[in-house]
Each structure stands twice: as structure tokens, then as C-alpha cells.
Image (cartoon, rainbow, N blue to C red):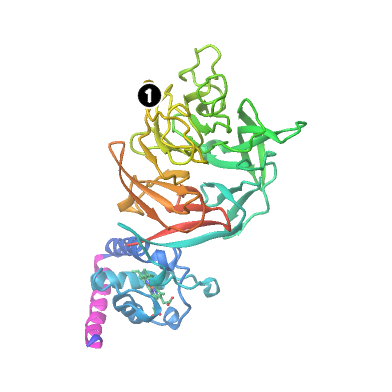
Amino acid sequence: MKKAVHILILGATVTAAVWFLVAGKKSNSSAEDSAAANYMKYCSGCHGAKLEKFAAKQWMDEEGITPVFNSIKFGLEDLGMPAFEKTFTDSEIESLAAYVKKGIPADRSILEAALTTDALIESEVQKFTVDTVVSGLNVPWGMAFLPNGDMLISERSGSLYIFSGGKLSDPVEGVPRVMAIGQGGLLDICLHPDYDRNGWIYFSYSYLIDGKGKPTGNTAIMRARLKDNSLTDQDIIFMGEPATDRNYHFGSKIAFDGKGHIFFGIGDRGQHFDFPQKLDNHNGKIHRLNDDGSIPADNPFVNTPGAMTSVYSYGHRNPQGTCIDPVTGELWVSEHGPRGGDELNLIRPGVNYGWPVISYGINYDGTVLTNLTGKEGMEQPVFYWTPSIGPCGMTFVTGDRYPDWKNNILLGSLPLKHLERVVMKDNAVIHREQLLTGIGRVRNVVMGHDGYIYLAIETPGKILRLMPVK
Ligand code: HEC
């Protein structure tokens, strides 16, 4: 039966080919374009974005597309290849088969195994597979994508790498010295929105002061340029004050708003009664600077005597996610509560977010920290998590690769070891989904330039990429 159908199809192929010849290049390339788009949506999750995941087989070097057509249409159930006869028309399958045959890398030795249907993760509204892009890392923290597709990766211990052509570079030279203890170290990386023109890369890290008995420091921001495998033009644009010898609650994820401002948060440094409610220090705050480190003239506390002028909002515990809403341009920050009471906050200038006067959390030892969850003059979170998820890293889903997740917020979870998907409507959380439960401590989540979602997992340290499968 299948054979008979197939002969008919071959006839159709010939007709189609003749028709392409007659109709000229335009139709041909539009069929190719839609085959490429279909491949990215339906196939790349298992076969790789560059068609690098196919078992090397005879069909690759045979004339014609018949076996390829059949495999796509009817699947290879035993091998873990789904059938697509209900998804595509025959002519779409022909275009796909031609696209695959043409696109298989000529160097067959680089081919890897395809992922199988067992590897498919069927979440509520999006199927995907997980691709391990980099492994062998030790607590990766920041990820940033250079225009050529290379990835910069920081490790908390203080190393910076360039991941290029499938390989990690030697550690980049010229990285600032860091206080790599507890939660401190080399933290986030972010490219200037105009990186193409100015080459600036921004790093957040815990600086280390010499000559103190105990390691002492605080969060700093440096910008630098990359030349070969070194950082040059290092320029420290911010140093958090005061430094302390506590080794936790440093923040600090970085975001740019596209208007020349950089935003980042510093945690309360473990001294919640000393810092977050007072404006005379940098701790427990979200900060806004111009891209060169100068203070924007319209920062909320520039005219407040005794206030640190970089402060944009205050009353924060430990902000670990900073991002700009791609639709509204507003600033969102996620922060760790104590036990319970992690928060998602919409940040407005000059606003007090209440820590530690108000909180939905309690102390880690179970004792009550504050009886207040709200107070006049203190902003409520848009959402809070009790029990805690320990949110770390946050991004909006942008681009076209995950249409059903578009503009959702993704957050990593450290203690629960999952990726949290949050659906927003009119600045309110209307739905949540736990993805990839048990994947490991998720330290960061970012959108790559290639439109894919990347996760940094702590130990064993690796970078994962979510490949959509329609
Ligand atoms: C759930 C994972 C998965 C998805 C999705 C998937 N494949 Fe496959 N595919 C496989 C596996 C596994 C095999 C068998 C191993 C191999 O040949 O590489 C395979 C085999 C193939 C083969 C070789 C068949 C043969 O005769 O040897 C082709 C061609 C192919 N797939 C094309 C596609 C195309 C085109 C799509 C998208 C429309 C697609 N696949 C989607 C997993 C998948």
C-alpha cells in the first residue's frame, strides 16, 4: 500500500521540479525558505540547528529523496523518529527532504546521534529537547553572546572563557581579582547594547580589599573590551560601599535599558537592619548608572542629602534577576526572600520595596522576622513565592522560536533545581509552570542571539540550550 502511494509521490516530485523550472527561481526559494523554517521548528530539536545530528547512513549519498521522504512521512518508530504525515502535506515533506539532503554537513565525521522521542519534553504548551552546549564548567554564572555567535562564560571562581566553534578558550586574561568565597566571585556579564560600535563588555563581581584580616569586599561593576584572549581598557565604573566581610547577598545581574542606562542590584550583605532601609549605603538597593558609570541627572535621590546617588530603588534583600520588559520597557527584578517570600518586583524610581520591615518570608530557623507583610509607603511585590524557589537569573522569552512562551518570564531555581515559567498579563502573574524539575541548580537563564534559551547549571557545571520541537 505504502509503495503505491509512494510511486504517486515520485510523480508529483517530477511535476513539481518541472514546475519550479518553469516558474523560475522565486517559487523555488520560497519553498526552500519554508522548508528551512519547518526544519527549525519541527526537526532541529532532535537533529541540531545545523543538521549535525543524523546517523551517517547511505541515503546521504544516494540519488533522490525517496527514502528520506518516507522516513519523514511515516517515521521510524523503533529508532525514535516521529512520523509527520499529519503535520505536513506531501509537497512540504518533499521540500523538507530536499532541504535535509542538501544541508547535511559534508564532513560526515562531525555528525552526532539524533535525539530520540524519549528525549522529548512535553511541557504544557511547548515540546522541546535539551541540548548540552558546554560541559566541564565549575559553577558558571554569567553568559553573554558576541555578535559572531561566540559565548562568554564566567565562572564564580573568577575565570572567564570564550566558547567558540564548540571549544572553550583558555581563561581570558585581565579579569578583575575577585572575592571568590560564599556567594561572591565573578558574577554577571552583559554586552553594551551598542557593542558593535563600542566593544564594551560589563562584568559584575565581588571586589576584594587587601590587608584586612578576613576577606572583605562588595559588588563592583567593571567594563572592558575583549582583544584576542585578553580584557583591555578595564574601567571600574562602580564599587559598592561599604565593603563587609560577609560573604553573601552580593546580587548581581546586569541589564541595559537601551537609553544608555545600566541597572543592577546589590543584596543586603547579610546586614538587613543596617543597610536596605538607609540611603547612605549601596547595599539592599537597585542602582542605575549611565553606561560610563556617571550618575544620571534624573536619578531619584541625586538631591537627597547623604544619599548614594546611584540608588534607583531600595528595601531589597538579594536581587538575582534584572531584566527589561521587551514590550513595555519597564524594569523587573526578582529577589530571594528569607524562608518563603521570594519576590518579583516591578521597579519604579525612588520606591521602597520594604525589606526587612515587610516580608512574606520567615527566618531560615523558622522564627518570625516581621509580622508585617504590608505597610504604607512600601511597595508590594507583583508576586511572591512561598515556599521559596530561590530565583536566580531571569529573562523574558523573545523572538519567534517559542511562540507559545512569547513574553513569558523564565527564572532559574537554585534549591528546587528547575526552570520556572511565569505567564504575565497586565503586569500580573496569571500562571506558572515548573519545567525541567531536577535538572540541577539553575544559576542563570538568558536568550541567545540565535533566539534559543540558554541555562547555566552549577554542578556539574554546564550550559544547556532548549531546542523547540513543534
Ligand atoms: C524526537 C526527535 C526527532 C524529531 C523531532 C525528528 N527526528 Fe528525524 N530522526 C530521529 C531519530 C532518533 C532518527 C534515527 C537516527 C538517525 O537516522 O539519525 C531520525 C532519522 C531521521 C532521518 C533519517 C532516516 C533514514 O532513513 O535513515 C531523517 C531524514 C530525518 N530523521 C528527518 C527529520 C525531519 C525532516 C524532521 C522534522 C520534520 C525530523 N527528522 C524530526 C529523531 C527525530
Q: Which residue: 52% across, 20% down? A: 279
Q: Position of residue 320 (x, y in %)?
A: 50, 39
Is residue 202 shown in magenta?
no
Q: Is mark 1 within 8 Å of ligand 1?
A: no
Q: Quadrant of the C terminus?
A: bottom left
Residue 448, relative to residue 258: is it above or below? below
255 or 365: nearer the eye?
365
The residue tagged 1 is 375
Residue 192, relative to residue 145: is it above or below? above
Q: Which residue: 52% across, 59% down? A: 133
The span shown in magenta is 3-23
Q: Quadrant of residue 130?
A: bottom left
User: Residue flagged by tag 1: what amino acid is it?
Assistant: Lys
Q: Secondary structure at mark 1?
A: loop
Q: Which residue: 48% across, 73% down? A: 113
Q: Position of residue 35 (x, y in %)?
A: 32, 65
Is residue 14 shown in magenta?
yes
Q: Is residue 287 left or right of residue 404?
A: right
Q: Position of residue 244 (x, y in %)?
A: 65, 30
Residue 193 seen: no
Disc 1 packing (10 Å; few <14; some 14–19; many ≥20) = few
The quadrant of the picture showing ligand 1 is: bottom left
Q: Is residue 318 left or right of residue 76?
A: right
250 or 49: nearer the eye?
250
Q: Position of residue 228 (x, y in %)?
A: 66, 47
Residue 401 seen: yes
387 or 352: nearer the eye?
387
Q: Which residue: 26% across, 78% down? A: 14
Residue lying at the far front in this picture: please name it: 367
Q: Quadrant of the N terminus?
A: bottom left
Q: Quadrant of residue 268?
A: top right
